[in-house]
Amino acid sequence: MKKPAFRKKSGADEASEPAGTAFAPEPAESADAAEPTGKGPAAGPGRFAGKAGGTRTTPSLLAAAVVLAAVFGIAQVRPPAAPATADAGAAPTTAQVERTGAVCPQPLQSLTGSTTLSAYTPPGTGSATGGTGWLSDASAPAVPAAQPSGTPSAAATPTATAPATPAPTGSGAPTAQAQDKNAAPADARLTLAKAGTPATGPAANGDTAPGTGAVATGALAPGFTVTQTTVVTEQRGLGLSGLTCTPAGTGFWFAGASTAGDRVDYLSLVNTESSAAVVDIKLYGDKGLIENDAANGLTVAPGSSQAVLLSTLTKGAVTDLAVHVVVRSGRLGAALHAADGNKGADWIPASAAPADTQVLPGLPADTTSARLVVWAPPEDDADLKIQLSGKNGWFTPAGNESIHVKAGMVAAVDLGKVTRDEVAGLRVSPSDPKHPTPVVAGLRVDRAAANGKSDAAWLTGSNPVGARATVADNRAGGSTLYLTSAGDAATVRVTASAGSGGGTPATKEVQIPAGGTVALPAPEPAGLNGVFALTVETVSGGPVVAARMLSIPTKDVPMFTVQALRDDHSTVKVPQAAQDPGVVLR
């Protein structure tokens, strides 16, 4: 039986803050005790780690009684200076997050590619002050393991590396002292100085460049966003690959992967936690679940990552795949990169959770081909209608009205030039509203130039932008924004930040008809110098899904990548509490 082909990095010897995790305000003296949830060695404290906890000897019953009596007495004699007056059933309040983290996978840039990292925090309206934002390389990559014949060389193998503190020599050994978790390390590759102005810079060079960890605290935490963009100009992996660096979690869905033809797809698993993660990789094709013991029980050690070649798990070529990453213990980040020879490459974004209706924004007007891939759960078949959102609302594309997906399987349909020179969003929803089935959907989109050269991008089911969403890396004349109203008519506010090297922010309000899609060249800052960020805020009306297309034509290839914009969750709910000294007696 084949084992997964992967490159494995150790050397990340220090624990990391959960990537993308947003924290509500903590007491000044709080301490978090990390508990191992999977197999593998525990990591020491690192630049992404929180404070370590501890244990105490259990007091005697008499001492416990004395302590309880003292606590109860103090609670009665010395109540809080401003006791809470809220009722037990009062609605929670909101508070800004104080710490946000993200992790980017190792860029797939081969020998000719280059990668840019961009970070941004929108100007805040809360009371938080101070804080830091920074991006830092992970430890140096280990020597790649031998790969089966027919797989790409180490130069084309994507291996994301968890953030860790590099040793001064670059060996990956831990530093003598742990960094302050709220301070930027001395070797930070990129530092975000203030909210409202993006920071950008190159990632490490070479075909074995490490991954990148990112953290923002204080006033820079709410809405902190990091974008990674890679340009590859050689035939293998040719194209523009972009993604918004994502948080750690326990489950991820990807639709649109493949092991057929010239496809080389890798799943990158990144563990930035202080305990090991145990992972199952479930692959579904047109015949259902693809059984392979090598895909179950993978252990990703703390501060390390693995990149798994999907073709080693499928027992033969499979044209259309849905991939489900299930984390049995711990948490990690997951990313899936697809490369189709010289036809294009990009990251397949993680899909929204399975739902009976999925909306996929961001179809360019000049789409030359599109392929829809849908997975249905083992419990039930799915009969879905396919609709496009045009300039005036939803409509059904002629010849591609519906798709039937058998239970536990994947179905696909070629939509061709479905947009017919108009921008669009795509929606799949139950043909019979009385028979909803939660599904996962992905869409490959190709654009080709007159010379026949092409590039590809992958879209996925997305959630609304909510109150606010941001994408960090935009270039002069290269960014297009796609806005689709998933319900009633809506109004959004689009803000272009100052440039990383200067410029004056610009703002524009856009009206979107019910069920309609609007595309607009991104507003650009006056006097733009460098890259800029785009922020979309819902002003009124129904939910809006949005995507940004970045186009960077290179060597006569129409290179492009599309990223969905999603709610930045810059605030959290804080439940109201009332004084109750009697709690010590319960």
Image (cartoon, rainbow, N blue to C red):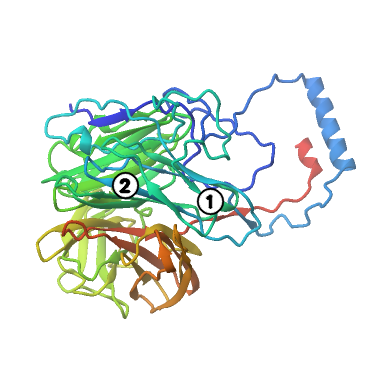
Question: Which image quadrant is residue 386 in?
Answer: bottom left
Q: Which residue is drawn at 18% across and 53% down?
A: 344
In the visual, does 551 lie left or right of 316? right
Q: Is mark 1 on a helix, strand or loop?
A: loop
Q: What residue would you read off at disc 1?
A: 193
Which percent across, then down, holds residue 94?
62, 57
Q: Is residue 207 above or below residue 82?
A: above
Which percent across, then down, holds residue 289?
23, 42
Dots 1, 2 in contact, CB < 8 A? no
Count how many numbered circles sit on residues in the image.
2
> How busy is the neighbourhood of tag 1: few (under 14 within 10 Å), some, or many (20 plus)?
some
Residue 581 visible (yes or no):
yes
| Residue placed most toward the observer, 462 or 496 | 496
Which percent across, then down, holds residue 552?
26, 59
- Distance from disc 1 to disc 2, alpha carbons, whole Å, reads 21 Å
Q: Which residue is drawn at 27% across and 42% down?
A: 108
Query: Upstream in the sequence, badge 1 or badge 2?
Result: 2
Q: Is mark 2 on a helix, strand or loop?
A: strand
Q: Disc 2 residue type? A: Thr
Q: Disc 1 residue type? A: Ala
| Residue placed most toward the observer, 335 or 559 | 559
Badge number at residue 367: none
Q: Is residue 61 above or below residue 496?
A: above
Question: Which image quadrant is residue 292 in?
Answer: top left
Quadrant location of the N terminus?
A: top left
Q: What residue would you read off at disc 2?
A: 115
Residue 255 visible (yes or no):
no
Quadrant location of the C terminus?
A: top right
In the visual, does 232 lie left or right of 392? left
